[in-house]
Amino acid sequence: MRKEKELFEFTACKHTDCRLAAVTGSPYCFHHQKNPAKTVSAIVNELQAKEKIKNLSASYVEFSNLDLKGKILQVSNFSHAIFKNVDFSESHFRIVFFDFCLFLNCYFKKMDMKYSVFAGASLTDCDFSSSDILHCNFNGITAKSCSFSESDLYFSTFAYSEISDSDFVDCNLKKVRFNNTRRSSVNFKFSNYEEAYFGEGVVS
Ligand SMILES: [Zn+2]
């Protein structure tokens, strides 16, 4: 009987007792790389060389000063990675995991993003403006000085997040969840926030 192809093709690290995902191009996770710098540059080369990337495994990898505009990223795992000065603008994401990542000064402008996960991530000075960000998970994020303005955030969720000095100006917030968020200086001007869910126990 033919085995159904699994959605995720990631494998576990070969190091004894390690259960982390092996990074693309290696049988080991990022922590068990003999030459981490070489691993990072191999993954960066792949990201830069290809327009369409699928099944990339890059947990805990550190990325900085990269132009990754206009990429098609599918079913990929960047959990716990660090991104500094990375520009993903005009990219297309489907089922991409950025949970518990650290993002500093990153751009996600004019994105087409669906079913992607930023849960538990920390985002500072990041710009998600003029994007379609549908069915995405931003639960438990810490966002400082971020912009989601002029974006369609339909069915995305920001529950239990801490959001400060950030803008959601002129957004579609239909079915967006902001329950149990801690917010300071968050601007919802011109957005349909009455169609979002702010729930009970809002802390401001
Ligand atoms: Zn490992």
Image (tube, rainbow, N blue to C red):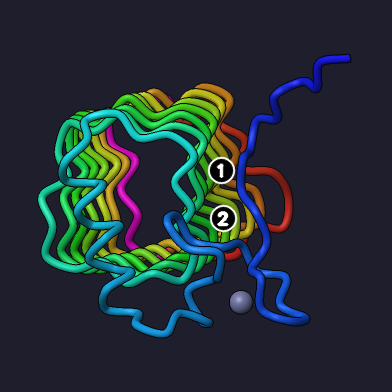
190 is higher (above) or lower (below) than 38: above
> What residue type is disc 2 on?
Ala
**Whereabouts is ligand 1, in terms of quadrant?**
bottom right
Farthest residue toward the top?
Answer: 1
Please give left or right for residue 5 compared with residue 57 in the image: right
> What residue type is disc 1 on?
Asn
Q: Compare marks 1 and 2 and give the one earlier in the sequence.
A: 2
The span picked out in magenta is: 184-192
* Residue at image coords 45%, 79%: 33
Q: Nearer the viewer, residue 66 or 142?
A: 66
- Say whether residue 53 is magenta: no
* Residue at image coords 47%, 63%: 26
Element assignment for label 1? loop
Q: Nearer the viewer, residue 158 or 4?
A: 4
Q: Position of residue 104 (x, y in %)?
A: 25, 68
Q: Position of residue 99 (x, y in %)?
A: 54, 58
Q: Residues within 10 Å of mark 2 (few under 14, many from 20)?
A: many
189 is higher (above) or lower (below) than 152: below
- Say whether residue 185 is magenta: yes
Q: Position of residue 149 (x, y in %)?
A: 25, 37
* Residue at image coords 21%, 43%: 88
- Give residue 119's mark: 2
Disc 1 target residue? 137
Q: Position of residue 97 (x, y in %)?
A: 52, 48
Q: Quadrant of the N terminus?
A: top right
Residue 72 visible in this rendered orientation of the protein: yes
159 is higher (above) or lower (below) than 176: below
Whether residues under marks 1 and 2 lie with C-beta atoms below 8 angstroms apart, the answer is yes
15 is higher (above) or lower (below) than 82: below
